[in-house]
Amino acid sequence: MANEMEKNNVKVGDYIVIQRQNYTKLHKVTLKGIVMLGKDQLELGPIIGRPVWKTYKMIPKKNGKRVFVLKECDNYESLAEQLKKDVSCGSDNRNIFDDGRSQLLSTEEIVSLRTSGMSGQAIVGQLIENSKTFRDKTEYSQEKYLKKKEKKYFEYITIRWPTIRLITEVMYRTDPLKIMGLRMDTLSQILTIVGIHTHGTYMVYESGCQGLVAAAMLNNINIGGQLVHIHPGNLPQKQAILAMNYDNDKMSCLISVNIYSLLRKLQENSASDENNVEVNKKESVINESFLSESESDNKAIKNEENSSNDVIDTKENVITEKGSGSGRLVCDSLKKDDKEFVEEKEITLNVVHERKRKHSDPGESMSKKPRWELETEKAADFLRPSKADGLVIISREHPSNILTALLPYVAPSRPFIIFCPYREPLLEIYIQLKRKNNTVGLRVTETWLRSHQILPSRTHPDILMSGSGGYLLTGIVVECSTSTNTQESGSSLQ
């Protein structure tokens, strides 16, 4: 129980999500513990060692300009509920005119209130008191005004653990181009189609998506499964993977390899396997001929040995009778010489081993291969005997050559998915795959998402929405028969 409680505590180096109303920000906890929320500076020292899902109140420093210290609290009340209790409202807004003179406080005075360290609730209370038209507004207009001010002066935050949905929303809101416009609904479609199970082996090629798809797939894989994360450069993009705070057991299921080194290793292994098969065939033929010859030779040798055994037996009897005493002395001397030779050999071997221990470095006993080469060999060992259970491709470049190189290493009856922000590359691949007989169930789809406002008597779709979440090409790999290959070659010749 104690270990489980410690896992939920915030530690230095962990990634957290700071939520302030509907605004969320991904942040890595450091010793200094300072984060900027807009123009507000927060000191995150009190959250270190405390569990997540705690709410903290932003208390302004007296001598600091928009610098806040966090204080843990149990719950919070919205400004609209606190300030609306003793305020009357009007019947309609027909006599209210937006001429810019309704607020008696100037901009400089409002800024000075904020820099002086006054709380958000007190500032909004001052704005209401110095407003000429607030009490004449309808109840709905007052609520709308208070929500607008609450969004600006809200003084409570909540600390949360990162999830795939939160990371996707944060990355999509900050810069959609960094993740190729991949929305959470498109990501959910990818995970559903690939059908990840915990002990499977999957490949994902990702370039330009901050490791978001790899993090989502790794989230569904446990010990016993493997995720081969393929990338084009020297180092993979792992921002989303690191943000999920995975433990060592989960990270052991991830193998990051370069696509060029992986394909080179797989081709070398296939070529060596073919050479070994040919050598084994040649050796079997040679062994068969050698055995047939040796059997005939053995028969002749046995006949000669049987004829010569009688002569040898008579000679041995004569020798033992004549020189039995001298024979014993010779045998004893030979045994002594053998013992002295073995003892000298053991002494020299011990001296050599001691010298090696003194002069050898601890790193020399370890493998001298670099880490990327070890991971490439590990990935090739997983993909060579049993192929992958699924393939996902998210690439900024044209995915045709990538699919052609990786599709042979997907097992039959397994799915593959290609994501692209544009439709034209996927249509080209669709036509290419239709001409072959190694895939079935090809589809090009587009996901469409629109959020709605759900309020009493005011439910309607949001005015602003994203244009597109990208396109998906999906299909299932099948095994080609020899008859279909001969038909294809014959039709191409015709």
Image (spheres, grey):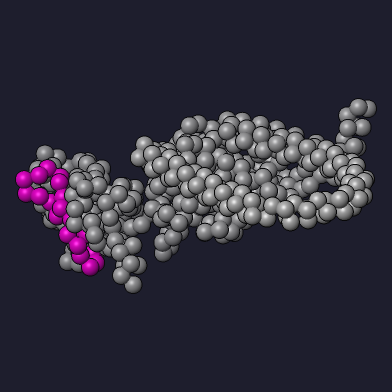
Quarter of image, res 363: top left
- Outermost residue, top side: 493
- Outermost residue, left side: 63
Q: 154 or 201: nearer the eye?
A: 201
| Residue 223: image location, x then y, percent | 52, 59
The answer to if 74 sits in the magenta stretch is: yes
Horizontal side of 353 relative to 186 (left or right) equals left
Quarter of the image with the C terminus is: top right
Quarter of image, res 407: top right
| Residue 328: image location, x then y, percent | 62, 54
Q: In this view, does 212 lie above or below 455?
A: above
Q: Residue at x 44, y 47 (%)?
A: 241
- Outermost residue, bottom side: 1
Q: In this view, does 335 lie above or below 99?
A: below
Q: 58 or 122: nearer the eye?
A: 58
| Residue 341: image location, x then y, percent | 52, 44
Horizontal side of 276 relative to 462 (left or right) equals right
Q: How many labels does the image show?
A: 0
- Outermost residue, front side: 322
Tell me if residue 425 can be seen. no
Horizontal side of 227 relative to 494 (left or right) equals left
Q: Which residue is drawn at 10% across and 50% down?
A: 61
Tell me if residue 329 can be seen. yes
Q: Give the range drawn in magenta.
A: 56-78
Q: Is residue 209 above or below residue 160?
A: above
| Residue 351: image location, x then y, percent | 41, 42
The answer to if 274 sits in the magenta stretch is: no
Horizontal side of 356 relative to 63 (left or right) equals right
Quarter of the image with the N terminus is: bottom left
Q: 454 or 334: nearer the eye?
A: 334
